[in-house]
Image (tube, rainbow, N blue to C red):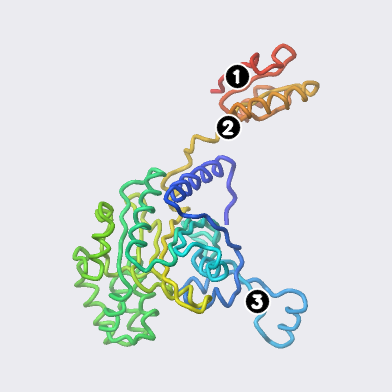
Amino acid sequence: MRDFLPGSVEARQSLIGKISTSYLSRGFQQIETPVVEDLDRLSSGQGGDNEKLVFKIQKRGEEFERALAEGEDLADLGLRFDLTVPLTRYYATNHSKLPRVFKAMQIGPVFRAERPQKGRYRQFIQCDIDIIGDDSLAAEAELISASLAALEAVGLEGAVIRINHRELLRANIAALGVSDSDALSAMITIDKLDKVGIEGVALELGEKFGSEVSTKAASWLGSLEQNQTPEILMPLMEAVGESAASLRYDPTLVRGMGYYTGTIFEIEHPGSSSSIGGGGRYDGMVGKWLGKDVPAVGISLGFERIADLVGESSGEGSFQVLVYQFEHLAAAIRLQSELVAAGHRVRLEQKPKNLKALLEEMTAAGATGFAILSEENANIEDLEFKPLS
């Protein structure tokens, strides 16, 4: 978990603004959900390995004392590890007040008890768009187009979206000799391919399911061709039109979440060694809370990795400094209000003995100009801001 200095916050907020504006312009509606969810919901078996990384919240008061005395679980809540699980709960709770096809946008922090290492944070921002209530390929096509547009809006062109389908994965895993009930466990292992290679994946599958599965897996992974799109994904390739040039079939793409049921995506960019987003179709998730199945699909952008690629040069953090003496405080506050109303960003600073030191400090903080208030320039038209450089 990190602190951010003012310049970084300015740049991050600017970046979030560009992403949200891009999504809002395409008709997605912004929502907010609490960072806390019921622990039962966060550990329902749908979140893959992320369920092991939940920050648990201890029961309180009499509930805690009773749980302690009776040897029950001491936690009943947890911090969300993604935005999809909260969204499905949100939809189940509020669906009667939402459009038949709900196009949601959610941007906010999520939490995972990761082992500290470079590029892995315990608190980080995700930017999600989801379409609930549409079982057609139009939903996937729209999400792909909107995600690429959002990346272009922040200056990241050339992104590639790797795609696969959970039905293909299950069929391939079944052919290895893994039962359907163990398919998710096998998927989680295959998802480590880019980290441990074919040999590492085959070894772990062998430890889980035996040497025969290991041998078949090594043969399968070694013979895969990623450039031949299977029939089940062809309709999507045709539906996305020009965006198809940014799609690439990857038969080893898994996505570790257990809730995916159909098409899955992962977004990569030549400037990053890790994916910068991902998602997929999760038609069975909403029904767990609503009592009836509702089709759903979504894509999440990994904000932290995008921010690392874009950098902090937002250009929107600059301000001007109005230096005043205490006896001119009322005039300084009046002038600040007038300048702000005219579209400027103005910071007030009392005049110190060492004006040079103050101006150097303000320059480092992002100030681009300054003016010194006196009785002679107490009106806005008389103020002259000098550049700080």
Question: Residue 172, position in %: x, y?
Answer: 26, 79
* Relative depth, front residue between 202 and 64: 64
Secondary element at tag 2 = helix
Question: Residue 176, position in %: x, y?
Answer: 27, 83
Q: Residue at x 56, y 20 (%)?
A: 387
Q: In the figure, 198 relative to 206: above or below?
A: above
Q: In the figure, 23 relative to 339: above or below?
A: below
Q: Which amino acid is tagged 2? A: Ala
The label nearer to you, 1 versus 2, is: 1
* Relative depth, front residue between 85 and 375: 85
Numbered mark located on residue 348 in the image: none
Is 270 situated left or right of 26 in this image? left
Q: Which amino acid is tagged 1? A: Phe
Q: CA distance from mark 3 to mark 2?
A: 46 Å
Secondary element at tag 3 = strand
Q: Residue at x 36, y 76 (%)?
A: 187
Q: Is residue 113 visible?
A: no
Residue 77 found in image quarter: bottom right
